[in-house]
Image: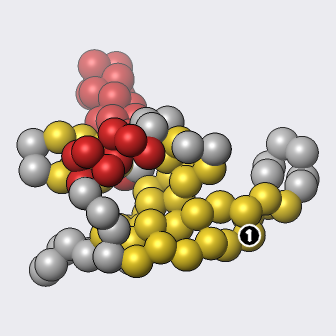
Amino acid sequence: MSYRIVLLIALLVSEAAIADSIRCGRSLVTSGDSVAKLLKVCGKPAMKYRSRDKDKRSGRTRSVQQWVYERGRKATMVVSLLDGKVLRIQRD
């Protein structure tokens, strides 16, 4: 019984990691990767814009760049960038 619980927890943790990534071709971009890697792997975005985001630690508002990747039949991906790094990846 405990083996099944451990397996379930491992699957849930790995699923959370996959939810914050984008696959372009055979490569994967995840949170924390550089903008250079994102451009190399996924190319130029279809659209770019800026939005305001509140830092959870300091409570300060910061300007975050949003890059939109059109995925064809798949969901559109919005990649949030801060200080030259991938902050988060969202599926629309």
Locate residue 53 relative to residue 73 in the image: left or right: right
Locate residue 5 relative to residue 90 in the image: left or right: left
Image x and y of residue 73, in percent: 13, 80
Image x and y of residue 53, in percent: 73, 64
Locate residue 67 relative to residue 81 in the image: left or right: left
Quarter of the picture containing the N terminus is: top left
Image x and y of residue 54, in percent: 79, 60
The residue lying toward the viewer, choosing from 48 and 7, is 48
Give the amino acid at mark 1.
Answer: Arg
Q: Residues within 10 Å of mark 1 (few under 14, many from 20)?
A: few
Which SS class for mark 1?
strand
Report the residue that reaches farthest toward the top. 3
Can the viewer see residue 47?
A: yes
The residue lying toward the viewer, choosing from 26 and 8, is 26
- Residue depicted at 43% across the width and 36% down the height: 33
Report the residue that reaches farthest toward the right. 59
Quarter of the picture containing the C terminus is: bottom left
- Residue depicted at 17% across the width and 40% down the height: 27
- Residue depicted at 49% across the width and 36% down the height: 32
Image x and y of residue 91, in percent: 37, 68
Vertical placement of 90 versus 15: above or below? below
- Circle 1 residue: 52
Q: How is the image coloured?
A: secondary structure
